[in-house]
Image (cartoon, rainbow, N blue to C red):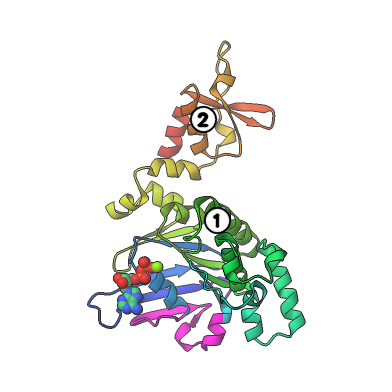
């Protein structure tokens, strides 16, 4: 069974009582084990509803949802909640419980003995980089970023294979947000959870998603693809519009510099230092930025102190075309 998808939504629709349109309409999505799928779309397009049908906080009106091959409607709720961590924007920490007690919520519910709970909290504190000095504080005494980390630690406490995250970084400022995004990617590189990550921010979706599902109003799936594929080949005008007018630049940010196709240094007499310099590890977006802010034609690429050659505007054009 190890190759079967971790989550499947099969022709799922949801119409809330008292409304005359579907919040989610005939949605089918297959999410593989260990991948991060970003669900992105405008406000009210059904992202939260979709996520909550996976852990059964919302029951579909029709269609079927499976997790690890089992129809979720047939799985006991406590088992489902143990196997699916859930992180939301306002974090939903219990205000009258300390950070430590919050993180220990699920293990305590599962009846683990106190030594086991304590050692699990200890592991999580290291995993999610929580400062031990805040363990006895209450949620109101934390910064937005700290609260978010505690929310992630709590969701991971019972080591669930699946993590659902609903705009988890929506309430923190841009600098902390970028930090948390990077931390999530680092964490994921080690844990290989199956993550469904809801956001309304296309840049965040492109950064964190192995694949990105773009939803339109009424929970209609417009395209489901890897970020590079979306940016290169948007399926329709809605997707193209949602990706924004800087689609080519976004694509460049996903393309590494190809060290084997660099051009030699320009002929004698041209000082390549005037073109600025970049590290071989950066993306073509940074290369373009360096070209535009330098001499406008090329930028020298270094591996440490060794100059490997230059990236030119023509090379960037060819990569976008290829
Ligand atoms: N409990 C509810 N009762 C009625 N309508 C709802 C309910 N929850 C959500 N909706 C509606 O369903 C649509 C999708 O909502 P939601 O999934 O929260 O969107 P998103 O998370 O993409 O912003 C919206 O039109 C919203 O107003
Ligand atoms: Mg929402």
What residue lies at 57% left-to-right and 57% top-to-bottom?
A: 180
* Quadrant housing the C terminus: top left
What residue lies at 59% left-to-right and 34% top-to-bottom?
A: 259
**Which label was assigned to residue 125?**
none
Q: Residue furthest right?
A: 115
What residue lies at 44% left-to-right and 34% top-to-bottom?
A: 318
The quarter of the displayed image where residue 272 is located:
top right
23 horizontally vs 64: left or right: left
Image height check: is 184 above or below 311?
below
Image height check: is 310 above or below 184?
above
* Quadrant housing the N terminus: bottom right
Q: Which residues are magenta?
A: 56-81
156 horizontally vs 30: left or right: right
Image height check: is 230 above or below 66?
above
Q: Which residue is mark 2?
A: 290
What residue lies at 58% left-to-right and 16% top-to-bottom?
A: 271
Which element is circle 2 on? Answer: helix
Q: Quadrant of ligand 1?
A: bottom left
Q: Nearer the viewer, mark 2 or mark 1?
A: 1
Q: Which residue is mark 1?
A: 181
Which element is circle 1 on? Answer: helix
How far is disc 2 from disc 1 in space, using C-alphas? 25 Å
Q: Residue furthest top?
A: 269
Name the foreground residue: 8 vs 299: 299
């Amino acid at each position: 069974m190890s190759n079967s998808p971790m989550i499947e939504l099969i022709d799922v629709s949801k119409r809330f009582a008292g409304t005359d349109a579907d919040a989610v309409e005939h949605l089918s999505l297959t999410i593989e084990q260990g991948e991060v799928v970003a669900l992105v779309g405008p406000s009210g397009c059904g992202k939260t509803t979709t996520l909550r049908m996976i852990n059964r906080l919302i029951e579909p009106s029709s269609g079927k949802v499976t997790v690890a091959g089992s129809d979720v409607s047939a799985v006991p709720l406590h088992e489902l909640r143990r196997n699916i961590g859930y992180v939301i924007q306002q974090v939903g920490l219990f205000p009258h419980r300390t950070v430590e007690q919050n993180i220990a919520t699920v293990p305590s519910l599962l009846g683990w003995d106190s030594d086991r709970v304590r050692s699990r909290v200890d592991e999580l504190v290291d995993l999610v980089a929580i400062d031990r000095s805040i363990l006895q504080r209450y949620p109101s005494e934390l910064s937005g970023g700290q609260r978010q980390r505690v929310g992630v630690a709590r969701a991971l406490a019972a080591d669930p294979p699946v993590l659902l995250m609903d705009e988890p970084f929506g309430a923190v400022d841009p600098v902390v947000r970028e930090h948390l995004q990077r931390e999530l990617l680092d964490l994921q590189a080690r844990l290989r959870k199956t993550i469904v990550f809801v956001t309304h921010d296309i840049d965040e979706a492109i950064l964190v998603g192995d694949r990105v599902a773009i939803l339109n109003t009424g929970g209609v799936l417009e395209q489901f693809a890897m970020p590079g594929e979306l940016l290169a080949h948007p399926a329709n005008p809605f997707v193209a519009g949602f990706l924004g007018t800087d689609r080519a630049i976004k694509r460049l940010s996903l393309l590494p510099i190809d060290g084997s196709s660099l051009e030699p240094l320009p002929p004698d007499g041209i000082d390549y230092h005037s073109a600025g310099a970049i590290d071989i590890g950066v993306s073509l977006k940074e290369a373009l930025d360096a070209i535009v802010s330098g001499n406008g034609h090329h930028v020298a690429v270094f591996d440490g102190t060794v100059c490997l050659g230059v990236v030119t505007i023509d090379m960037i054009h060819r990569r976008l075309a290829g």
